[in-house]
Amino acid sequence: MISFKVNGRAVNVREGTNLLKYLREEERLTSVKNGCDSGVCGSCTVLIDGKAARSCTLKVDKLQGKEVLTVEGLDESEKEVYSNAFAEAGAVQCGFCIPGMVLASKALLDINPDPAEEEIKKAIRNNICRCTGYVKIVKAIRLAAEALRESKHIRLNTCSSNIGQNWRRVDAVQKVLGEAVYCDDVFMEDMLYVSVLRAMKPRARVLSIDTTAAEALEGVEAVLTAADIPGENYQGYIFKDWPTFVPVGEMTRYAGDAVAAVAAETKELAEAAIKLINVTYEEMEPVTDAKYAMKSDAPKIHEKGNILSRTHVKRGNPEKAMAESRYVVKNTYRMPPIDHAFIEPESAAAFYDGDVLTVYAATQSITHDHHELCRVLGLPHDKVRVILHNVGGGFGGKEDLSVQHYAALAAFYTKKPCKYTFTREESLLCHPKRHGMELEVATGCDERGMLTFMTARIIADTGAYASLGTAVLERACTHACGPYSIPNVELEGFCVYTNNAPAGAFRGFGVPQSNFAGEANMDQLADLAGIDRWEFRYRNAVEPGMVLANGQICGDDTAVKETLLAVRDEYYRSKYAGIACAFKNTGIGVGLPDVGRCRIRIKDGKVVVYSAASCIGQGLATVMVQIVSETLGIDGSNIIFSQPDSLLCPDSGATTASRQTLFTGEACRRAALKLKAALAEKTPEELEGLDFEGEYSGVTDPINSSRENPVSHVAYSYATHIAILDAEGRVAKIVAAHDIGRAINPLNIEGQIEGGVVMGLGSALRERLVYEGGILKSRFGTLGLLRADEIPEIDVKIIEKNQSELAYGAKGIGEISLIPVAAAVASAYQRFDGIRRFELPLEGTPYNRKKVEE
Ligand code: FES
Ligand code: FES
């Protein structure tokens, strides 16, 4: 046995035990997170004799006589300092990385009470945060340092009002102290662990599955295959084409396809049992190239053929405009698939509560999960309940079912609680990615630099299953023209099945790809026309009353020119500055149902807000409380945003399309107005227990509507970014100017923008997924994620112009913050070395001189 101390308490642990496993599963110190299990992400950071160490790669054998500290073991004054510092700085989003960040900070501050910014960044360089862009984490550490050094309390921001105030997030302190519960933190009596057998063959027929040996293993309680699905085997967001398990006789379509699952008493047993399942396959050459997949003689991946969807938008006469244009550029751009790399791997726990199968999920929509689980399980809606737990980042990658149905099936059969948490490898292997795309884009202008036409042909590799691919392709097409007035356009896109991993929603939803191509063409046209790149954009940018390329008339809130003006001086001052503009829809739009809902009730004297809208780290609960507080004119401490729960909360749609602040926010405002009217007549006590419902439905027109000026989306956000390089060609600064309508919580908005900018920088400079023959070669450590000491200065400029009463004028920010980054950086490199780059990630930069994959 090895003897050491954990948070001051002596423990004796068997040799060979992994420290992270011991801390989480034996000690239940769940502030210590498992983000990658491979020493890359830092979410498992602990202090060992005061030094930061990654517990996932450590065996206890090295700990004899040592002291291990987790966030739970901080003394009360340190807990207060770190929780106040991180909360006040706005450094907490999904929160999954934060306890590890706190301990990495403490390791630094205990020996260096007044660190320079570079020292702070170095101290946390082994801790990856995918949400915040690190800016506010660094600020939080400086705040903590000052408080500890000078033994003073951190002054808490007091807000005099609600809208436009930097309220601290309602979930921040819990997340800093590791008290916030994520699905993998759930432990229940008699809980079983689920493991799933993946085919690892991108295109093969399943000939037989023999589960005998796995079933015979002691401690295994269920072995499940397609034959055990009580409802529908196939599920999916838009098309039901994704099998829960590939049945005998059918084809696999990508390496991550599930063939069987095991529920067993321990994780190790479940994994051992999986290896005992004998599957025979007839292997075939996978189809991994989208252009080849489009050919008529390519093998069919799905019965209906390989073209999942075609999007075609045409306005005006682009052929004629091209012939008459003074300047024309035409280029082909390519972007690889990219992983979301949220730090929390997917996890779900399922159990029976009476006769209701209850699922704890970390999802972007409990309503979608609820519908799909009922289909797979063959159960009526009142026999399944989905409750949201904290979501450690999503960015679009937690829209589809991933683990939920396997945990639920295991609980259905065993009648015991069952948990299924992806390993990081499974997370990379299985969930849908950002689409790899190829775009041919032609753009023209007249001699004054006024845009005349744009055409684009887009091929999107949507991988094995539809997921949200069709909608992603639509957004790529409808946003290809950018926030400019272009009278003649033709945009054609194809979403193509291959045997690669599925591609689906990812922050930006297809627009990062088409924006990169469109903005690169703008630069080249500006250069050809002899007009500087800022001026070219300013001349062509839309204003209120003008018409977007999709035909929609710009509302009074349109402020792309204001974003351009906000960056102008710095752009002209900087030698190597690149520029890009963007726009992005708020809400699903294009004629589809798009509804935000909430119900407000006074319960035990508090105002409780019920809505099924998921917070995936963006701060939704805080913003909803601010809106209700403003509307009712009461203090926010009297308002609670209830945990989303399919039994209690009305459907408010998915957290997608940058929609929740506007849609659920407006629903909350409407419900609060009803409560306010009632409070004018009755006391809160008399209203206790009564429901006040709010609903906001965005009414829009479908793509290719016959209307001259269709309303495709209820609102758009606009942005201009400039990227400034230093003399060595490193990105020194990003200036990000955003038209966000109205900032309900400016600190939150800044955090969203900083996080989006850094994610966009990652895709510009380094990130990609590498596949060979449909098999993923990338690992978490080779994705190319940026670390704290690689982040440039980020200057956020917020433009507020929207006078709409809907959600007090808020528009979406979640996605657009990422969209123009890559194009602005490419533009800057072209000015730096004269090379126009047509592919992402950009090659030949200090970030990517040698290949990331080795
Ligand atoms: S879980 Fe240990 S470094 Fe990621
Ligand atoms: S807040 Fe850091 S990973 Fe989400």
Image (cartoon, helix red, strand yellow):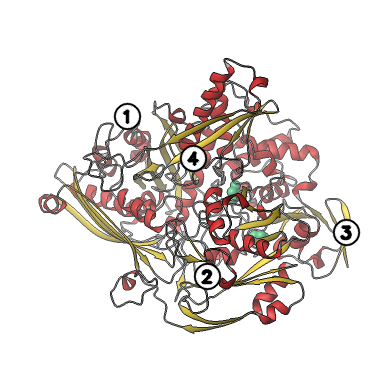
Would you say the residues marked 4 and 2 are in contact, meaning their CB atoms lie under 8 Å apart? no
Q: Is label 1 or label 4 in front?
A: 4
Q: Inspect the image, locate mark 2, and give the three-letter code of the amino acid beneath it.
A: Gly
Would you say the residues marked 4 and 3 are in contact, meaning their CB atoms lie under 8 Å apart? no
Residue 660, which numbered label?
A: 4
Would you say the residues marked 3 and 1 are in contact, meaning their CB atoms lie under 8 Å apart? no
Q: Quadrant of the N terminus?
A: bottom right
Residue 498 picture quarter? bottom left
Q: Which residue is mark 3?
A: 11
Whether residue 291 is situated above or below residue 514 in the rendered picture: below
Q: Which residue is mark 2?
A: 256
Disc 1 residue crowd, few under 14, some 14–19, many 20+, Cα 10 Å: some
Q: CA distance from mark 4 to mark 3?
A: 47 Å
Q: CA distance from mark 1 to mark 4?
A: 21 Å
Precedes in sequence: disc 4 or disc 2? 2
Residue 556, which numbered label?
A: 1
Q: Is mark 2 within 8 Å of ligand 1?
A: no
Q: Is label 4 or label 3 in front?
A: 4
Q: Residue at x 71, y 34 (%)?
A: 147
Q: CA distance from mark 4 to mark 2?
A: 31 Å
- Estimate the x, y position of residue 270 in percent, counting from the top left: 69, 71
Q: Inspect the image, locate mark 3, and give the three-letter code of the amino acid beneath it.
A: Val
Precedes in sequence: disc 3 or disc 2? 3
- Estimate the x, y position of residue 615 in percent, counting from the top left: 56, 43
Name the secondary structure under disc 4. Answer: helix
Precedes in sequence: disc 1 or disc 4? 1
Name the secondary structure under disc 1. Answer: loop
Q: Inspect the image, locate mark 1, and give the three-letter code of the amino acid beneath it.
A: Asp
Q: CA distance from mark 3 to mark 2?
A: 40 Å
